[in-house]
Image: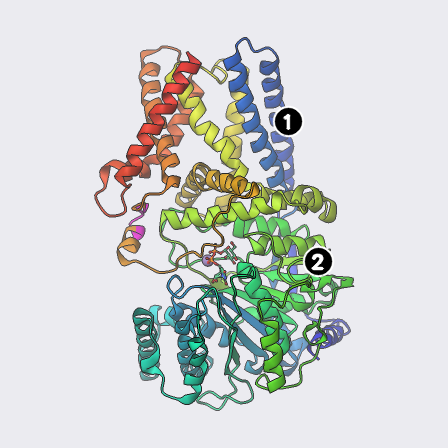
Amino acid sequence: MEGPRLRECSAAYASHAPPLLHSLKPSRRTGSNRLFATVYACAIIALFYRHAHILLYSKTIVSFYVTLTLFISDLILAFMWVNGQAFRMRPVYRKEYPENIEKVMKTSDLPALDIFICTADPYKEPPVSVVNTALSVMAYDYPTEKISVYVSDDGGSTLTLFAFMEATKFAAHWLPFCRKNDIAERSPDEYFASNHSRSSETEKIKTMYESMKVRIEHVVETGKVDEYITNDQDRQAFSKWSTDGFTRQNHPSVIQVLLEKNKDRDITGHWLPNLVYVSRQKSKTFPHHFKAGALNVLVRVSAAMTNAPIILTLDCDMYSNDPRTPLRALCYMLDPEIQNNLAYIQFPQEYHGLNKSDIYACEHKRLFKLNPIGFDGLSGPNYVGTGCFFLRRALFGGPSTLVLPEIREISPDYIVNKPITAQSVAELAYQVAGCNYENQTEWGCKIGFRYGSLVEDYYTGFRLQCEGWRSIFCYPERAAFLGDVPFNTLDVLGQNKRWAIGLLEVAFSRYSTITFGVKSMGLFMGLGYSYYAFWATLSIPIATYSFLPQLALLNGVSIFPKVSEPWFLLYMFLFLGAYGQDFLDFVVGGGTIQRWWSDQRMWMMRGLSCYLFGLTEFLLKSIGIPTQGFNVTSKVIDNEQSKRYDQGLFEFGVPSPMFVTLTMAAIINLFSFSYGLIHFLNGSNKEGLFIQLFLSASIVMNCLPIYQAIALRSDKGKMPISTTITATVLASAIYAVATIVLK
Ligand SMILES: O=c1ccn([C@@H]2O[C@H](COP(=O)(O)OP(=O)(O)O[C@H]3O[C@H](CO)[C@@H](O)[C@H](O)[C@H]3O)[C@@H](O)[C@H]2O)c(=O)[nH]1
Ligand SMILES: [Mn+2]
């Protein structure tokens, strides 16, 4: 019913000289972008000409190897630069007019919406915030009987189920409250933290919320739900955990319908949406494919229960910040001109709680805002895992090649006409949530979310676009979703390392973006995807430029052109051109100067840590040495840490090998800068070492927080002393080697 209905609606829309649902405007900077790209490309060619010349005529073996290293580094930088141009070729800006939807369609005709929320660990992802996310979308300005929320709990935890049982009771009050007062923040935590009204009604509901929160947090603290179980129905639900040997890695499926539309009502008598808790079966003998596996189970379970034509995927920390978001997505989905090959509508990942200068550059402006705008003028943005509305059909083969699943009842056009609690529906749901269900099927390779990469989001979007689907980037002024950011250096680097590995898995697979991607999607789309896929290879040039020129400087060896040579200008142009354009993009895209500074600093820091380790781990993995899987980012806020974060202090605290390489670079640059400066002021070799001195100075500037963490801080977030010692020993060792080689 739902599938064809979407098409019928848009047919009606097309025949009526319809009111505008969305519009598109190409960016005014396209022309200058292309011009600059041409000039910059010429400069890169000139640089390689110089490298080739020196390589051919190098007098010593050392100078040959130094140039070769720089040559390889510059080759990678140039390759990444070329990839990045894809985003600059045709950026477009879009606008939607959700207020016009009601002119083209009756509310009762709106398509149904299945919302997926993933959580994986109650101790890293506090159940109370997962509940907030769920409540924020259950309260969408959308007919409640059309909404079904499915929560996937990969932690297989009673704590999460308990939190949701509490949420069902609270929802009966919260949903009518939001509707009546037309509240914008529909995540209760966010609403009560904001400048809300102080009416007695609000105070009452706030008390209700606080007491639910206390219960949930208490349960998480004690790890036991028993004391709050009062009725048989709940006891029944929790009894599944008493099966022998129930652990999070090994347990039967638990599927619990917590709210059922047309049956459960809120306190004003309105229907409540469906709310279903799903913890898929796990067994150590079957791979579970992390989040992609969890999402595929939800695709099937929701197909068995509601099979809505539209699916919204959300991470547990991404709550809705705008209740009209589904209508925005519909502005595109209802348009018959794009509907036929439209796979998904991606909203940007935006965050709350970033500190003023966003020290960890978690905003990822390029990744989540600027580049998708660039992609959008081509075939559309990559999928970023959350805040994304899919057309269910897109998960089942290309636009003109439907791939049907193995059982008819879960295919995208199947009409479910039974209530979700019907016995047969429940049986089917359990069947498709089983851990061996996917054996010998196309799930994960041709159907659903794709397996084989730790960045299942990126990989799935990529494969869909290769099949011929397009996507759309939708970024309303008011953020549609807001999420949490990691608050300490190790979490940030750990997350980025996971991404780096996942991306390399795609880069070096048989579906590589640069071969398969370019062939299937065209040059620019393929390049744009490659910009991410090969991200971690940036560690090679970044590490080279953070160590080699400095070690040479410390030995008085000049490796770049002299200030008086014309080549000097080329180097300056390449450096200032790249940073200047990056700066402009960032600031014109709404960023502040401070945040740009953090962004470029983190680029360097990631290159020296997580990209480097990601690359290494990927290589180990390729030769069969097992490495870590999907390490979930912690969303728990430690008060002390968060205070330091608000002060803009980097959090180190616990030793990590990733801090060692960073600290080594910081030490070497500090020494080379000081040494260079003294010699520079003395007047010896002023011209030849200028670029090296300049480079050291910029890196020292970027490393200021590291020096501070090593020497000037005494709080718990300072650099661990063992890290400083290890880094000092290693830095001295490479200095010694460099001196022997270079002298
Ligand atoms: O086995 C797993 C592992 C993770 N998750 C969920 O996946 C989501 C993302 O995990 P998180 O630790 O927050 O990772 P991030 O690096 O912050 O997430 C980004 O990167 C991921 C890919 O690495 C994408 O899946 C996410 O959508 C994207 O926001 C969370 O809701 C988890 O609960 C699962 O459901 N099962
Ligand atoms: Mn996350």
Query: Which residue is outermost to the bottom?
Result: 269
Q: Position of residue 33 (x, y in %)?
A: 61, 39
Q: Position of residue 77 (x, y in %)?
A: 56, 32
Horizontally, residue 330 falls left or right of residue 217, namely: right
Residue type at mark 2: give it.
Answer: Trp
Instruction: Give the label, 1 or 2, closer to the camera.
Output: 2
Q: Secondary structure at mark 2?
A: loop
Q: Position of residue 232 (x, y in %)?
A: 41, 89
Which of the image's four quarters has the N terminus? bottom right
* Residue 199 visible in the shown view: no
Magenta-highlighted residues: 645-651
The residue indicated by pointer 2 is: 469
Main secondary-structure element of the magenta-colored stretch: loop
Residue 646 included in the magenta stretch of the image:
yes
Asked whether 202 or 620 is in front, the reply is 620
Residue 187 position (above or below residue 448): below
Q: Secondary structure at mark 1?
A: helix
Tell me how many marks there are.
2
